[in-house]
Amino acid sequence: MFKNNSKKFVISFLFVIIIFAFDRFSKLYILNLAETEKYVDIYFTSFLNFHLVWNTGIGFGLFSSQTNFYYNLITIMIALINIIILIMIIKSKDYKLFFLLMILGGSLGNFFDRIYYQAVPDFIDIYYGSFHWFVFNVADIFITLGIICLIIVEIILNNKKVNNEKE
């Protein structure tokens, strides 16, 4: 039993580290570009470019604030949420583990930036015409995908439970 748990821990830890590293490398690449070029504004396609912005809020720039009190409050809340996610990961025994690990890996990437830079570098800008979606980063992608997958799984599982109870 202990061997099984240690294997789960190592695989989970590696998965989180890979997500964290992928996020860090992408941000370091953009930050190095910004340092050498003085700005980042790279156009890839008619709907995607890289444009560096600093986010002091939570995902997609929500609740951004210049006040240290609110910034610190949000940072403490994110730390507590990460602890809750970690507890959920430890208790998880099914495929939801994978989605929780995605959320944790991305969240730790952004949390690191909040502590180290006092803001999170966002740089992926998706747009259509003059409509721009929120600028985000690789960590936000993993967090969002993990949450969407958890929601879908819950909807499917709850739908199966309802259908089984009707039969």
Image: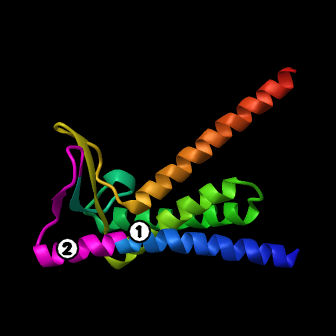
- Give the residue pinned by disc 2: 33
Circle 1 Cα neighbour tier, 10 Å, few/some/many (<14 / 14–19 / ≥20) = many
List x then y, in percent, for residue 77: 49, 62
Element type at mark 1? helix
List x then y, in percent, for residue 11: 67, 72
Element type at mark 2? helix
Alpha carbons under labels 1 and 2: distance apart:
16 Å
List the single residue furthest toward the front. Answer: 45
Question: Is 145 in the magenta?
Answer: no
User: Which quarter of the rendering shows the C terminus?
Assistant: top right
Question: Is 42 in the magenta?
Answer: yes
- Give the residue pinned by disc 1: 23
- Please name the amino acid that badge 2 sits on: Leu
Query: Left of 49 or right of it: where is 59?
Result: right
Residue 22 visible (yes or no) = yes
List x then y, in percent, for residue 43: 17, 54
Residue drawn at x 72%, y 66% is 90
- Please name the amino acid that badge 1 sits on: Asp
Q: Which residues are magenta?
A: 26-48
Q: Within the image, what quadrant is residue 164 found in?
A: top right
